[in-house]
Image (cartoon, helix red, strand yellow):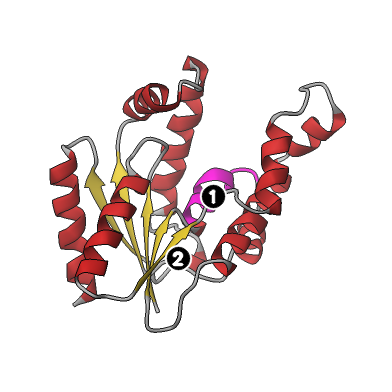
Amino acid sequence: MKHIAFEGIDGAGKSTQVDIQYSRLQDMQIPTSVYRYSEKNNIWGEIIRRAYSLDQHSKLHFLFKLRIVQETLYALSARANLRSCRRDNNELLLSDRSIVTAYASHLNDVPEWFISLMEPPTTPDLVVYLDIPPEVGLRRINDRYKKFKDEDLGSLVEFRTLYMHVMSEERPKRLKNTEFVMIDATKSLEEVTSEATEVIDGFMR
């Protein structure tokens, strides 16, 4: 089973591309399953949602702020999502985020070995990284969800910086055989889709 993951900071257009590519691959009669890595439609996702709504002065809120706790909960949620994803060894697994997100989110604060141990067993063979400036990501998020504030720009900058590290020669050991391709996602949807299609079709040959 081959695993192709779309990655990028918030607002990069990952979900949009996964939907477009899944529909295209279905039309081509290529058996494909979609894995929504960060969906929270499971018990661990419910715990994460509740944690975000905790009073900031509570002890439980302080506990959730620990990156190792966050990584554990998100990894368990991702594992549950993978189990619920119907697939077999002959299918292509197309995912919106993957273990790469975990490294880019937590590698500064959580040991690499712990992330590698906790995350789901599937590792992408190909990562299509949709690159946008953090300012663009913030604007897209604000337009779409109306829930982020200006001070979140710093977290997006850090997120993108860690992505660059994860995709470098110093990448985590678990990603040593993963191929990374970067696409400028500030282009039009049609242009990004065309480039992503070319990358995926080249990989599938």
Is residue 105 highlighted in magenta?
A: yes
Q: Percent x, y for residue 112?
A: 60, 57
Q: Percent x, y for residue 183?
A: 23, 48
N-term-proximal mark, 1 vs 2: 1
Would you say residue 70 is visible in this rendering? no
Three-letter code for the amino acid on which mark 1 is drawn: Glu
The quadrant in which the C terminus is found is: bottom left
Q: Percent x, y for residue 9?
A: 41, 39
Describe residue 111's horizontal placement relative to residue 124 as left or right: right
Q: Element type at marker 2?
A: helix
Q: Percent x, y for residue 91?
A: 37, 78
Task: Give the residue number, with chain letter if any, for mark 1.
Answer: 39
Task: Give the residue number, with chain letter if any, for mark 2.
Answer: 175
The quadrant in which the N terminus is found is: bottom left
Seen in the picture, residue 201 relative to 115 is either above or below; the reply is: below
Q: Residue furthest top?
A: 150
Describe residue 171's horizontal placement relative to residue 196 as left or right: right
Q: Main secondary structure of the magenta part?
A: helix
Badge nearest the viewer, 1 or 2: 1
Residue at image position (58%, 58%) is 78
Q: Over which residues does the magenta segment extend?
A: 100-109
